[in-house]
């Protein structure tokens, strides 16, 4: 018995020691110096009905405890200083309190749970409700009525990076109100407002957009390496070890050099040799053009230099006053003279031209303004708006809108000889740099889906966009790791001059490339071919853009029984000298809006030459013909940058542009 007792005592001692050691091993100090991603800030929205990842940085080895709505999760900071906790799904509601506990407690208040959408793209997504260059229709009224405490806004700062970043630049979440909405994306806001009103749950909108950018800037480097044309540049960018400060200085240096390079090129081409810029040059035989306008709308289908000149009378009570010369927007580059002396130059289409005129250069009475405009593609001219075209003192102004004299420079500029633009070397249009800095840091925040408005900057490479855009959608989905989340996008709006005859068109080809992404699951398109503006690439009707995107989401994501699309081409067949077109999404029927004859259809025979066609509705189909073509083979609809077209369904949604042929277009092979 004695021996047995000794053995038991020894066994108990061993067990006790193991228990003590085990307790020592699992006892972890609270994490020190916890740093949260700006996504986890007061007023945030978490995605409902999905696992909720919460993450950040801290000193390695410490314990982080996360609490939300009566649930708790914890983790240990890894050797690289990263930590992440995944909480169980929560239904829509709030407000809640999110606590992240370490050595100190971080408390995030007024947290809502609802629907979170990423809103990305270029300037038409960036365009604000009522600030800067972007102001929507009825912007003041929209701001005044923006009282939606259950809509929350998050703006990612515009920044680039050569490699994928985890640090996000933002001021955090704000509650939607008249005080906070002015600077936020109009498309995103109207989309979110429509969803919030229909779903009656909190909505979080994450704006991450940058004007003038190309789609490849928003794609990951590892996915872009699959494209031969981007493989080398992506590798170069990824290996660039320059600091952000060094890159910023380089970008500023190149930007400052750019006007000098443009002017030097123009001088070498002889465009100043005529003396058009001189105050005494005879412009009697120059033609008249009413400004603001893009010159393509006046029949000038040229890329090159056009000179504009206007004489104005300065009143005697302006004597001795410095003046401000405002010319509005100019596409693409200008050099401007006042009474024969250069007063300014501009190289950015998005920036309104405003130049200072010293009093010493001003005559009482007649003065001459001369503007040399260089267009390198798409459209050219002084496009306004008219109210911004003026010359003024502090308290008075004279409008410059109206008739100007103009002359086409006889010297033809070879665009290929122009110096490379700065942002092609060091700016936001480099492949992968916006994904790295403005998308990757959002991962793996739980979201419902994404909306996208971009494509204008890729229009001259529309065939390439077919693969790039679809690949970008798959890229984001793969990186987020949340399956095939919904992705809805805006088709390019109507813009530029109206063509008198059917022709090949890069914007039409880009719209076609966008629609090809509909082959992917959980995608949808908002057709805006009827709400654009011929002379403004940033149309002001963003309310309908947001609504049409929201119709896609309500029908396809939230399973509402509503019509979300206008007619979409499905198939064709030839019967004699007519082609019969069949459609999806006809709703209660097809209609020609305005009870007019159908417009926008063109037809071609085997010679592939399109001419305008007659078209009529018969039941759920469209019959297309032209008596001059006996054996038609193809039809196109709304195939232009700014088409005249009027096919809708009874839900008053416009038909998407389409073509039945697959003939190589004008952007084929462009990379």
Image (cartoon, helix red, strand yellow):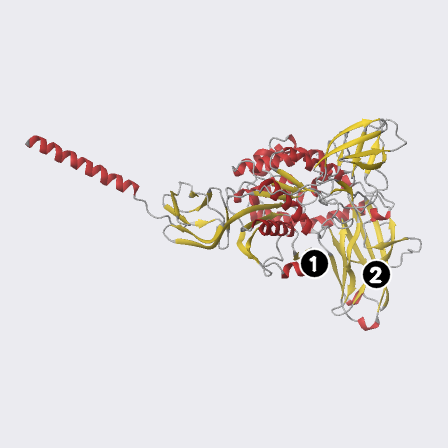
Image height check: is 401 above or below 546?
A: below
Pick the quarter of the image with the C terminus: top right
The foreground one among 443 and 260 is 443
Is 463 or 253 nearer to us in this picture? 463
Q: Secondary structure at mark 2?
A: loop
Q: Residues within 10 Å of mark 1 (few under 14, many from 20)?
A: few
Rendered view: 85 above or below 185: above
Q: Position of residue 251 (x, y in %)?
A: 63, 48
Query: x, y percentage for residue 536?
Result: 75, 50
Neighbor class of circle 2 (other Cα within 10 Å; few <14, some 14-19, many 20+) is some
Residues 216 and 138: in front is 138
| Among numbered discs 2 and 1, the one appearing first in the sequence | 1
CA separation, marks 2 and 1?
Answer: 39 Å
On the picture, is 294 further left or further right than 197? right
Q: Where's residue 52, x and y in %?
A: 46, 44
Q: Quadrant of residue 506?
A: top right
User: Residue 138 bears which disc, if any?
Assistant: 1
Residue 337 at x, y percent in the picture? 81, 57
Disc 2 designates what residue?
A: 339
Residue 628 to residue 77: above or below: above
C-beta proximity under 8 Å, tags 2 and 1: no
**In the figure, residue 437 lies in which quadrant?**
top right
């Amino acid at each position: 018995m004695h021996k047995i007792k000794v053995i038991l005592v020894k066994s108990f001692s061993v067990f006790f020691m193991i228990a003590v050691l085990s307790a020592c091993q699992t006892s972890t100090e609270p994490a020190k110096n916890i740093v949260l991603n700006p996504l986890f800030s007061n007023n945030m929205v978490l995605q409902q009905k999905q696992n909720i990842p919460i993450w950040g940085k801290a000193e390695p080895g410490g314990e982080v405890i996360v609490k939300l709505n009566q649930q708790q999760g914890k983790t240990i900071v890894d050797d690289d200083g990263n930590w992440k906790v995944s909480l169980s799904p929560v239904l829509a509601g709030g407000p809640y309190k999110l606590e992240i506990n370490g050595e100190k407690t971080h408390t995030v208040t007024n947290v809502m749970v609802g629907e979170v959408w990423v809103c990305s793209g270029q300037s038409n997504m960036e365009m604000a409700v009522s600030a800067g260059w972007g102001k929507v229709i009825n912007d003041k009224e929209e701001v005044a009525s923006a009282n939606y405490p259950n809509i929350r806004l998050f703006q990612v700062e515009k920044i680039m990076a050569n490699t994928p970043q985890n640090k996000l630049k933002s001021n955090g979440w704000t509650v939607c109100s008249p005080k906070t909405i002015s600077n936020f994306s109009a498309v995103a806001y109207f989309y979110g407002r429509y969803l919030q009103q229909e779903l009656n749950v909190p909505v979080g909108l994450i704006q991450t957009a940058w004007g003038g950018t190309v789609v490849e800037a928003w794609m990951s480097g590892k996915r872009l390496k699959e494209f031969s044309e981007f493989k080398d540049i992506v590798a170069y960018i990824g290996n660039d070890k320059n600091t952000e400060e060094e890159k910023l200085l380089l970008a500023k240096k190149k930007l400052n050099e750019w006007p000098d390079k443009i002017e030097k090129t123009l001088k070498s081409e002889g465009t100043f040799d005529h003396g058009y810029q001189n105050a005494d040059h005879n412009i009697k035989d120059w033609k008249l053009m009413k400004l603001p306008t893009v010159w393509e709308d006046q029949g000038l289908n040229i890329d090159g230099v056009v000179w504009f000149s206007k004489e104005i009378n300065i009143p005697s009570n302006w004597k001795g006053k410095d003046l401000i010369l405002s010319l509005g927007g100019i596409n693409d580059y200008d050099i401007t003279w006042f009474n024969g002396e250069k007063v300014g130059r501009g190289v950015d289409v998005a920036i309104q031209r405003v130049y200072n005129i010293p009093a010493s250069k001003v005559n009482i009475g007649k003065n001459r303004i001369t503007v040399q405009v260089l267009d390198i593609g798409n459209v050219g001219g002084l496009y306004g708006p008219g109210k911004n075209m003026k010359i003024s003192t502090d308290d008075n102004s004279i409008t410059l809108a109206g008739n100007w004299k103009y002359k086409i420079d006889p010297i033809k500029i070879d665009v290929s000889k122009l110096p490379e633009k700065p942002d092609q070397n060091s700016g936001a249009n480099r492949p992968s740099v916006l994904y790295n800095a403005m998308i990757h840091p959002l991962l793996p925040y739980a979201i419902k889906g994404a909306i996208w408005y971009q494509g204008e900057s890729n229009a001259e490479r529309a065939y390439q966009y077919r693969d790039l855009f679809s690949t970008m959608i798959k890229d984001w989905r793969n990186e987020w790791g949340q399956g095939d989340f919904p992705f809805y996008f805006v088709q390019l709006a109507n813009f530029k001059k109206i063509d008198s005859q059917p022709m090949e068109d890069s914007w039409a080809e880009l719209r076609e490339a966008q629609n090809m992404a509909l082959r992917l699951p959980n995608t949808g398109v908002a057709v805006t071919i009827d709400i654009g503006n011929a002379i403004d690439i940033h149309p002001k009707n963003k309310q309908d853009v947001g609504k049409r995107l929201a119709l896609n989401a309500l029908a396809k994501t939230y399973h509402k029984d509503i019509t979300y699309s206008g007619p979409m081409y499905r198939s064709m067949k030839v019967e004699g000298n007519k082609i019969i077109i069949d459609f999806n999404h006809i709703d209660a029927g097809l209609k020609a809006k305005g009870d007019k004859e159908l417009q926008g259809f063109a037809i071609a025979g085997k010679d592939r030459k399109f001419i305008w066609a007659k078209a009529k509705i018969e039941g759920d189909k469209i019959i297309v013909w032209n008596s001059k073509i006996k054996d038609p083979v193809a039809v196109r609809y709304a195939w232009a940058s700014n088409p005249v077209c009027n096919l809708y369904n009874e839900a008053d949604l416009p038909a998407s542009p389409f073509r039945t042929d697959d003939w190589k277009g004008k952007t084929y092979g462009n990379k």
